Each structure stands twice: as structure tokens, then as C-alpha cells.
Image (cartoon, rainbow, N blue to C red):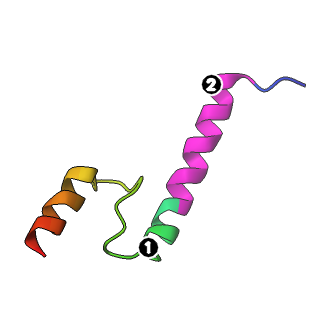
């Protein structure tokens, strides 16, 4: 059985939307890798302030 790429992508996004809020609350406030609305630029700004 072959899963169409579009269907696979929809399922992945659906699962990510459900799990992201759950795990986002567990991350450290200073963790910037692969997090929504946080970038390397934000990490650099924080390092310059501290």
C-alpha cells in the first residue's frame, strides 16, 4: 500500500498541531532550536543582554 505524499503531510501536520502545545510547555525558556516564533536571532539578542 502506498500512502500519497499529500495525505502523509496532512497527517503529520495534524499530529504536530496536537503535540506541539503539550511539549512546548516542557521546554526551557532558553531553548531556541526548532521552536515556533523563536529564532537564532532571538538567542543572540538574549546572549548580548546577559
The residue to which callout 1 is attached is 27
Q: Secondary structure at mark 1?
A: loop
How far across and down, in percent of the image, does residue 4 sit? 73, 22
Instruction: Classify 26 as above or below 3.
Output: below
- Return the residue found at the far right: 1
Q: Quadrant of the N terminus?
A: top right
Q: Which of the 4 image quadrants contains residue 47?
A: bottom left
Residue that mark 2 sits on = 6
| Residue depicted at x 68% and y 33% | 8
Name the N-terminal-most of marks 1 and 2: 2
Residue 31 painted magenta: no
Q: The residue tagged with tag 2: helix, strand or loop?
A: helix
Chain part drawn in magenta: 4-19
Majority secondary structure of magenta residues: helix
Q: Nearer the viewer, residue 29 or 19?
A: 29
Quarter-wise, where is residue 7 in the image? Answer: top right
The structure residue drawn at horizontal position 61% and vertical position 33%, both measured from the top left corner, is 9
Amino acid at each position: 500500500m502506498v500512502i500519497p505524499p499529500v495525505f502523509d503531510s496532512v497527517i503529520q501536520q495534524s499530529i504536530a498541531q496536537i503535540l506541539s502545545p503539550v511539549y512546548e510547555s516542557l521546554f526551557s525558556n532558553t531553548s531556541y532550536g526548532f521552536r515556533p516564533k523563536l529564532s537564532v536571532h532571538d538567542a543572540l539578542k538574549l546572549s548580548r543582554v546577559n
